[in-house]
Image: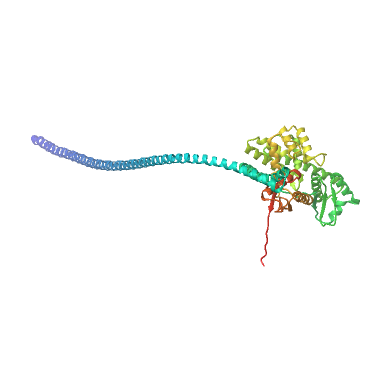
Amino acid sequence: MVNNNILIPAVIAIVFLLVGLGIGYAIRKHSWEKKAQNAQNDADHILADAKAQVATAKAEVDAQKQAAQAVKQSAENTKKEKILEAQEEINDYRQKTEDSLSKKRDEVSRAENRLQQREDTLDHKNSLLDERESDISQRENQLKQQQANLDDKLNEANDLIEQRRQKLYEVAELDRKQAEKIVLDQLSDELVKERAELIRNSNEEVQAKADHFAHKVLVDAIQSSAADTVAETTVSVVDLPNEEMKGRIIGREGRNIRSFEALTGIDLIIDDTPKVVTLSGFDPIRREIAKRAMERLIKDGRIHPARIEEMVDKARKEVNDDIYEAGESALMDLGIHRMNPELVKTLGRLKYRTSYGQNVLAHSVEVGKLAGTMAAELGLDEKLAVRAGLLHDIGKAIDHDIEGSHVEIGVELARKYHEPEVVINAIAAHHGDVPKLSFIAELVVAADTVSSARPGARSESLENYIRRLTELEKIAMSYQGVKQAYAIQAGREVRVMVEPDEISDDRIVVLARDIRNQVEKELDYPGNIKITVIREKRVVAVAK
């Protein structure tokens, strides 16, 4: 019993041991199988990754091979293109070189042909020169022979003339003095003809040499400036708003008129002309002051002696300012930068001065421009010429207030304000009162003549105009053989008709010159006067 009790636990223990061993083996086997499976999975993953990497690497290698193949192909294509371009450039350069060489060969060939032609021409000319030398030698011999013959004939002619003269004495029964008179008359006619021919030739020669240059200088000078023409007047007209204003201007018992005339020195004319009053006076500056004062009074409406005095003072100050500004404007226009202020003010007074309808300040500026332009063209002092031209009529600014001619007054003003001697002489000589000491003075005279004589520059009073035309015709009619003389074209031309039986064709040239000289000597006139002498002979025969 005891043994069974021991054996059964032992058997059970062995059974449990065996079962535990089996279970442990099973568990260990399962664990091993799981590890083996994990290892197999890991190996599969590793193998798959390796295969993927191998495939990727293979793909990359294939791509690199393809890229390398493409680069190689592109390089080969580029190489071929470059080779083709180089070949084309070589061909172009070869073609250009060949063309250039061909042109040069053609030029060389043409040059050789020209040289050959020149050589042939020279040879021909040499032969011609040889022929001409022989011809000249023959002609010289012939001329010597002809000269000898002419000398013989001249001697024969002198002998014949002497014989004719002796026969003339015998036939006409004239003494020596009478015969000499006939010969001298014939000689006088011949001299007149020769003189006319000399006059023609000298005029043509002088004109050929001087006309072109003189015309160029004058045209350039004239084109560079121009002046306006104004109407010469001694009255100014002021418009009124209504007729009632006339009574207010007159004032009680005419006190306003008396006050206005006393303050301005201008006559105030109030007549039947509707809505206007007239200001009359020879001094243009005082007339301008009076006009401005009257316009201010009319606009203001308050007209009495105190107000008149106030407005006249304001107008006088305004006109004085305008005068100085006009002088400065003239200086700026001509590029003159330095001048005595008092002389500038005197120059500005010329704005209100006219001469034959031409504004004197505008005329002076124009003369300055003309003289400066001509001086520059001739290489003289342009600034000095401009200054002399501007100041040449400065005396006209105050010739209403000071006795003496505007030339004398201008010279005194220039000396007073220390102007250069050349300017002073130009002022003194521009009307020929004193000799001209410089070429600038001559230019000022020429510029003054051009400015005053150009068409439209001046208007002339009827009395002076008629007197000048009459004197022109009188001078022309004073010559023997003149049948009629007419001044035409506003005195710019004189047409002289002569008796054809008394004056020959050669003598009319001398007559035109003599009339011209007398006109230049005796008359004062602007511009030029053309002398036209006409000789016409008519023969009429009537067939019946």
| Residue 181, picture quadrant | top right
In this view, the residue farthest toward the bottom is 544
Which of the two residues, 2 or 389, is positioned nearer the viewer here?
389
Of the 4 image quadrants, the one containing the C terminus is bottom right
Q: Point out residue 237 in the picture as x, y percentages from the top left corner.
A: 80, 52
Q: Point out residue 159 in the picture as x, y percentages from the top left corner.
A: 62, 42
Q: How many marks?
A: 0
Q: Is residue 397 left or right of residue 262?
A: left
Q: Point out residue 418 in the picture as x, y percentages from the top left corner.
A: 74, 32
Q: How is the image coloured?
A: rainbow
Q: Is residue 490 above or below residue 408?
A: below
Which of the two residues, 421 or 541, is positioned nearer the viewer here?
541
Q: Is residue 319 visible?
A: yes
| Residue 443, picture quadrant | top right
Q: Is residue 435 left or right of residue 265?
A: left
Of the 4 image quadrants, the one containing the N terminus is top left
In this view, the residue farthest toward the front is 170
Which of the two residues, 126 or 329, is positioned nearer the viewer here?
126
In this view, the residue farthest toward the right is 253
Q: Point out residue 406 in the picture as x, y percentages from the top left corner.
A: 78, 40
Q: Is residue 333 visible?
A: no
Q: Is residue 51 left or right of residue 151?
A: left
Q: Is residue 272 above or below residue 188?
A: below
Which of the two residues, 541 or 69, is positioned nearer the viewer here?
541
